Image (cartoon, rainbow, N blue to C red):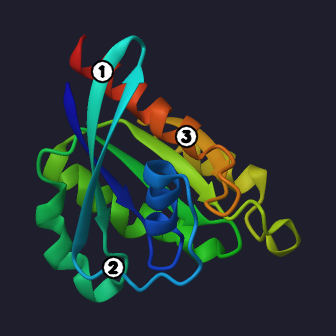
Amino acid sequence: MKFKIVLAGDGAVGKTSLINRFVTGSFAGDYKATIGVAITSKKLVVEDQGVNLQIWDIAGQTLFREFRKKFYAQAQGALLVFDLTVPKSLDNLNLTWIQDIEQITGEIPFVLIGNKVDLKELQAVSPIEIANFIDQHPNIAAHFNTSALTGENVERAFSELTSQIIASVTT
């Protein structure tokens, strides 16, 4: 099976770092902003199924909003990424990202990722705010707080989204 997934969220929330951690198992602190889209792939086994994930890292800067919509076509799932230290990055998922994705794809499974959990002393988004956000979006199948730096919950988030896609295509 081959699935196209997108990582969506504001610039500098850690999308590229999460992909790098997931695909290569490493972290580099000196990323440049993604221009347009970067596509990576990884093979994995989820629920006894061999899966090839085609991972689309969508540019987060506002100036790319109209341009990036075409990259959502045929996506079967999305990781919605926000920065736990920047509350506006969660708000923006609701204001632009989810609407833009669903306008192109219809309803697809989402997994919500609060990234940079390793920066505990700087966290500015509460668990209650996250729970309220999830309550407003019934197609958010799961939520994970992750750290691209340490790898915490990164594999779990990608695997859960893959499981949700498998469930959605086999029903």
Separation of residues labelled 2 and 1 (CA atoms): 29 Å
For label 3, the SS is: helix
Rendered view: 63 above or below 54: below
C-alpha span from label 1 to label 3: 16 Å
Q: Dot 1, crowdedness within 10 Å: few (<14), some or many (≥20)?
A: few
Residue, x 44% and y 67% (percent of image)? 16
Instruction: Using the rendered view, name the quadrant where residue 119 is placed.
Output: bottom right
Report the residue at 76% width, 50% height from top.
128
Residue shown at 71%/73% (left/top)?
A: 85
Look at the picture and state if 29 lies above or below 128. Answer: below
> Does the residue at mark 2 contact the one at mark 3 (Cβ under 8 Å)?
no
Q: Which residue is mark 1?
A: 50
Instruction: Identify the secondary structure beneath mark 1.
Output: strand
Vertical placement of residue 24 versus 47, above or below: below
Quarter assignment of residue 60: bottom left
Q: Quadrant of the C terminus?
A: top left
Q: Which of marks 3 and 1 precedes in the sequence? A: 1
- What is the x, y in percent for residue 162? 38, 31
